Image: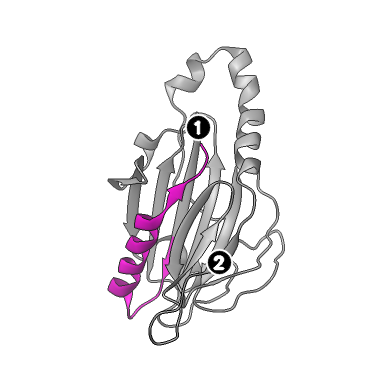
Amino acid sequence: MVPGPAFRSTGLAARRPRRALALLPTLAAIALVAAGCGAPATAPAAAGGQPRAQQFKNTYLTFRYPATWKPLAFRRPQALHSSPMVYLSTQAGRPACSADCTWPVSQLHPGGILVVWENRGYPGWTLRTIPGKPIRVDGRPARRNVSRPGVCAAIGGDETVVVSVARPLAYNWTQLTACLRGPRLTAAEHELDGVLASTRFLAP
């Protein structure tokens, strides 16, 4: 699965009644599955004949992304606490992988970008345990953490950007993980800013 921030248990989970804890796996599974799958839609063409942007939309969220990014038809082994919604990259990827594979591309090209949107759930999770700068995404509290190289070093990335967005469901969050490879890191960060600014949540 896509590596995310390290988790640590909090006293909240310990104080929950046994019945409430027993319901957590079911609630998390419902929240993860409810996101479903989506498909990109092409935005109107710009004056030069090239599309200004693409749009992704499923039952959970919608956002715009650069036309140079393409969705990847990637399948990975099912993970208990993670439900990927879409993979986007500036380069082609592999369609599937074995149990020890977590990335849809094996090596980023120079200037390459890989972005993963997923819903996650884990008992006891809270946003305040996540490192990074406090931000908001469509009004929801979030944290944006940048590390160099971070976990994206596994595929040749120079920078890892993780945006964790709290959901209005206990112990659930939405996560964007972006792997960036130089030399155009600043430009890639601006493109990510545009993605986050255009994001709208359609469900809890």
The magenta-colored residue range is: 178-204
* Residue ID at (44%, 67%): 65
* Residue ID at (54%, 51%): 118
Marker count (numbered): 2
Vertical placement of 29 versus 145: above or below? above
Q: Position of residue 15 (x, y in %)?
A: 48, 14
Which of 159/176 is in front?
A: 176
- Residue 1 visible from this viewpoint: no
Q: Quadrant of residue 33?
A: top right
**Per the image, is 61 magenta?**
no
Q: Quadrant of residue 193?
A: bottom left
- Residue found at the very far bottom of the displayed protein: 48
Q: Is residue 53 left or right of residue 16?
A: left
- Residue 147 visible from this viewpoint: yes
Amino acid type at image mark 2: Ala
Which residue position holds label 2? 41
